[in-house]
Amino acid sequence: MITERLTDDKVGISRAAEILQKGGIVAIPTETVYGLAASAFDGEAIKKVFAAKGRPQDNPLIVHISNMEMLYEVAKDIPKTALKCAEKFWSGPLTMVLPSNGRVAPEVSAGLSTVAVRMPSNKTALDIINKSGLPLAAPSANTSGRPSPTTASHVENDLDGKIDGIVLGSDCTVGVESTVISFCTNPPRLLRPGAVTAEQLREIIPDLAVDKAVLAEPEKGARVASPGMKYKHYAPKTETYLVEGDSDKFIEFVNSKNDGVAVCFSEDADKITVQKLIYGTADDESTLAHDVFSVLRKIDTLGENKAYIHSPSKTGVGLAVYNRLIRASAFKVIKL
Ligand code: AMP
Ligand code: MG
């Protein structure tokens, strides 16, 4: 299949909407990561999304909407707290799992009675949803298991020739996928951390629970609330370790290794004598979120046997970065 390159202007947006209305699949920019979009009402189109990504069938997709009316086209019995969260955090990187009204194709929710919904803030994404008039199911536009795509060229590397179109928009500003919270449990539960932090959510939901899968490996065979959290994810081919400890210990540790690349904070880079990749500054976790997936993709280009990534803090947006990195390192954590 030839993948159409589309511009992120009126012409490209109209063409993307047309392809989506006809049951095609198109990669689109959002503020979190690039998404691979299809009509949430079209089961055949959704099947193409799963096939292009190689995504396991039991991992449901997030439905992207552009206004509050669309929320009622896909969900029902929406709790008041969820509406408060929508008011505070939409448009933006928050996904809410709600009771489905049964209208989205069953493939979207992987057969569950719930539906995950988000209103992105990226203007191109909103314009495409508006123009198509459709809620769009859109998982990250990467090959399943690979780091999520934060630039159009990441998408091309993974999916060129497998999808109908790519909208060539700007790089993603947030860089990690949305926060996912379920309102189908009591109390509501954080399933995946993102740029809307647990601390911010607790201002509206003081008793917010945090799913075990956020910080640790789910037990083998255990039922997980968010099916996506049980899969190996974001993994470079290089054997990757997450290293917890202060800067002095990290620097000493990586400098003693001769077979690896250090993924470090910018403030420590000068003192590191082995091959290194910088992924932002420890003091501003949003810089780490912004670059983490690009850095994970770069690791494999350096030809080293191992990668040692300096762990961020587990607070604020740091929790989202930590959550992705324990998966990228297949839960291999070294505590110094
Ligand atoms: P991605 O589309 O790649 O960003 O992944 C979507 C994430 O949202 C995965 O971790 C899914 O398991 C989760 N998700 C989507 N829909 C639901 C749902 N109905 N219930 C629980 N988790 C969901
Ligand atoms: Mg994904």
Image: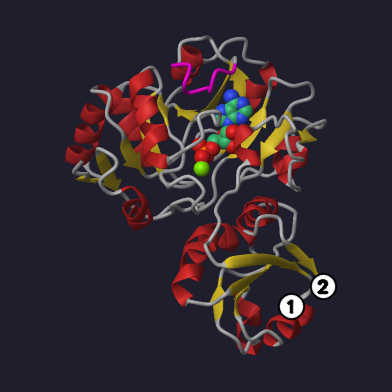
Write the start and end of the magenta stretch as one range: 105-112
Looking at the image, residue 278 lies above or below residue 57: below
* Amino acid type, label 1: Phe
Most extreme residue toward the front, as rendered? 221
Q: Quadrant of residue 252?
A: bottom right
Q: Quadrant of residue 95?
A: top right
Residue 116 falls left or right of residue 82 = left
Q: Quadrant of residue 287?
A: bottom right
- How packed is label 1: few (under 14 Cα within 10 Å), some, or many (20 or more)? many
Q: Does the residue at mark 2 contact the one at mark 1 (Cβ under 8 Å)? A: yes
| Disc 1 secondary structure class | helix
* Mark positioned earlier in the residue sequence (2 or 1): 1
Residue 278 falls left or right of residue 162 = right
User: What's the mark number on residue 250?
Assistant: 1
Residue tagged 2: 336
Q: Residue at x 79, y 71 (%)?
A: 245
Quadrant the N terminus occupies: top left
Residue 227 in sight from this viewpoint: yes
Looking at the image, residue 21 lies above or below residue 192: above
Residue 140 shown in magenta: no
* Amino acid type, label 2: Leu
Q: Position of residue 129 (x, y in %)?
A: 35, 29
User: What's the mark number on residue 12?
Assistant: none
- Asked if the residue at label 1 sits under 8 Å from ligand 2, the reply is no
- How packed is label 2: few (under 14 Cα within 10 Å), some, or many (20 or more)? few
Looking at the image, residue 45 lies above or below residue 170: above
Q: Residue at x 75, y 55 (%)?
A: 314
Q: Main secondary structure of the magenta part?
A: loop
